[in-house]
Amino acid sequence: AQKITQTQPGMFVQEKEAVTLDCTYDTSDQSYGLFWYKQPSSGEMIFLIYQGSYDEQNATEGRYSLNFQKARKSANLVISASQLGDSAMYFCAMREPSADRGSTLGRLYFGRGTQLTVWP
Amino acid sequence: DTGVSQNPRHKITKRGQNVTFRCDPISEHNRLYWYRQTLGQGPEFLTYFQNEAQLEKSRLLSDRFSAERPKGSFSTLEIQRTEQGDSAMYLCASSPQGPRGYTFGSGTRLTVV
């Protein structure tokens, strides 16, 4: 079963508008971490935002916020005031739960990504 | 130290040849990871080091793949007898101990012809 599901292969948004990228995850663990990465055409994976499963507040980093709904197992990324430079592939990922307890495991599970295009 | 460095950025090789990639992590990070990303997919985990110890390997890492991290610093990923299916972006990442995420390098794009 997929641990991370991103159902939107592509999204389009006009410059200066807000956009929400969907992500649902699957885990039976109580302790886990959720991440969003941006991958421009150059290929580098750029960390955007992190949400721990025990964090009570939704994470925010500048124009990025994570809409964390634990009961629904969703971790949607909201980008406010979109810019042309936001056009890229966006990946949602979950850290192997046991890594948060200091075990030897530390892999990330990634979704298939959403291609965001910002138009003027 | 400004980030994770990967070399080369691009590699084109003929089928059957061996290739080796290098990753230099952020110096204070003791964890190092290799991922493979094929077109249209998210990165998939290959292997993981904590210091010099290789603690986990994915089933994706066939016998033709080997990774090392001597002295717990840089790491190399070698692919022997390359096949066209090995064409992908190979990403390296490092992280400190704890729950937060990684810093990725820019990747090595391998094309097997």
Image (cartoon, coloured by chain):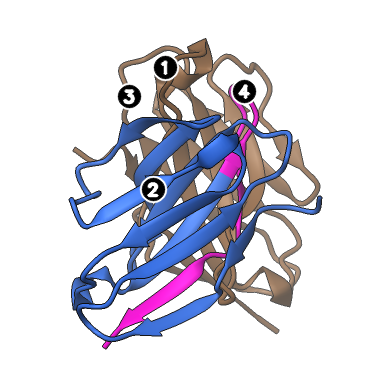
Query: Which residue is denoted by mark 3 in the rendering?
Result: A27
Query: Which chain comes out blue in the rendered image?
Result: B
* Pair 1/2: label in front: 2
> Total of numbered circles in the picture?
4
- Mark 2 belongs to which subunit? B
- Mark 4 belongs to which subunit? B
Query: Which residue is denoted by mark 4 in the rendering?
Result: B97
Kind of residue indicated by mark 2:
Ala
- Please determine if labels 1 and 3 lie on a single subunit: yes
Q: Marks 2 and 3: in contact by CB < 8 Å?
A: no
- Mark 1 belongs to which subunit? A
Give the magenta part as a residue range: B94-113
- Please determine if labels 4 and 1 lie on a single subunit: no
Q: Marks 2 and 1: in contact by CB < 8 Å?
A: no
* Pair 1/3: label in front: 1
Kind of residue indicated by mark 1:
Ser
Is residue A108 in view from this perspective? no
Query: Which residue is denoted by mark 1 in the rendering?
Result: A98
Kind of residue indicated by mark 3:
Thr
Tell whether A64 sits left or right of B105. Answer: right
Decide which of B39, A12 is in the foreground and name it. B39
Tell me the quarter of the picture where residue A82 sits. Answer: bottom right
Query: Which chain comes out brown in the rendered image?
Result: A
* Pair 4/1: label in front: 4
In the image, is residue B61 part of the stretch drawn in magenta?
A: no
* CA–CA distance in space, label 4 to label 3: 22 Å
Query: Which residue is denoted by mark 2 in the rendering?
Result: B67
